[in-house]
Image (cartoon, rainbow, N blue to C red):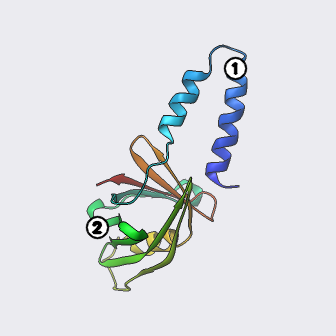
Amino acid sequence: MHTVTLRKIIFTCLLAALSACGPVEQVAEEESAATQTIPLEGSNWQLVQIKVLGGFVFTPEDSGKYVLNFRSENRLTGTSDCNDITGTWLQEDSSLRFEPFSASRKLCPPGSLHNNLVLYLKDTVAHEFRDGHMLLSTTTEGIEMEFESR
């Protein structure tokens, strides 16, 4: 089950439980504002962290080396450490896919997150916005990439 779906189920159960205690409208409005869909065209995002299975978190030494640029006509450009990213992005509601997706194959210095980022980006299936950050999830449960606006 995807993290996004699990969160929606938990949120729905929480709302049902809270409805017996009092007004729920404010909670629902706050949740809606926190997870709103934002058009990606013209935006640029830099990596904050990658969470993987087992709860491990990888944080880049320099977030500015890991950037996604959502261009017009659904063109994707960016950098992943010492490599370039290109492709196409498709956004519909909470789903997000990169098809086609490619990255150059230069050998980056030790400590680079390039291999992990590219591996997970190509499998991206959903996104959500929370507190000004964009969270990408993949076909593998437990993988989450967090980006902040640049």
Q: Residue at x 69, y 34 (%)?
A: 12
Q: In which quarter of the image is the N terminus?
A: bottom right
SS at circle 2: helix
Q: Residue 76 in the image: x percent, y percent? A: 39, 71
Nearest-to-viewer mark from 1 and 2:
1
Task: Provide the residue designation for mark 1.
Answer: 19
Q: Residue 14 in the image: x percent, y percent? A: 68, 29
Mark 1, Cα crowd under 10 Å, few <14 / some 14-19 / many 20+, is few
| Mark earlier in primary sequence (1, 2) | 1
Q: Residue 2 in the image: x percent, y percent? A: 66, 55
Taking the image as drawn, is residue 36 in sight?
Answer: yes
Q: Nearer the viewer, residue 46 or 89?
A: 89
Mark 2, Cα crowd under 10 Å, few <14 / some 14-19 / many 20+, is some
Q: Nearer the viewer, residue 69 or 9?
A: 69
Task: Provide the residue designation for mark 2.
Answer: 65
Q: Is residue 50 above or below residue 129?
A: below
What is the spatial separation of the Cα atoms under label 1 and label 2, in whole angstroms?
Answer: 46 Å
Q: In this view, does 37 lie above or below 140?
A: above
Q: Residue at x 48, y 35 (%)?
A: 33
**Seen in the image, is 74 located left or right of residue 43?**
right
Q: What amino acid is found at the position of numbered circle 1 in the picture? A: Ser
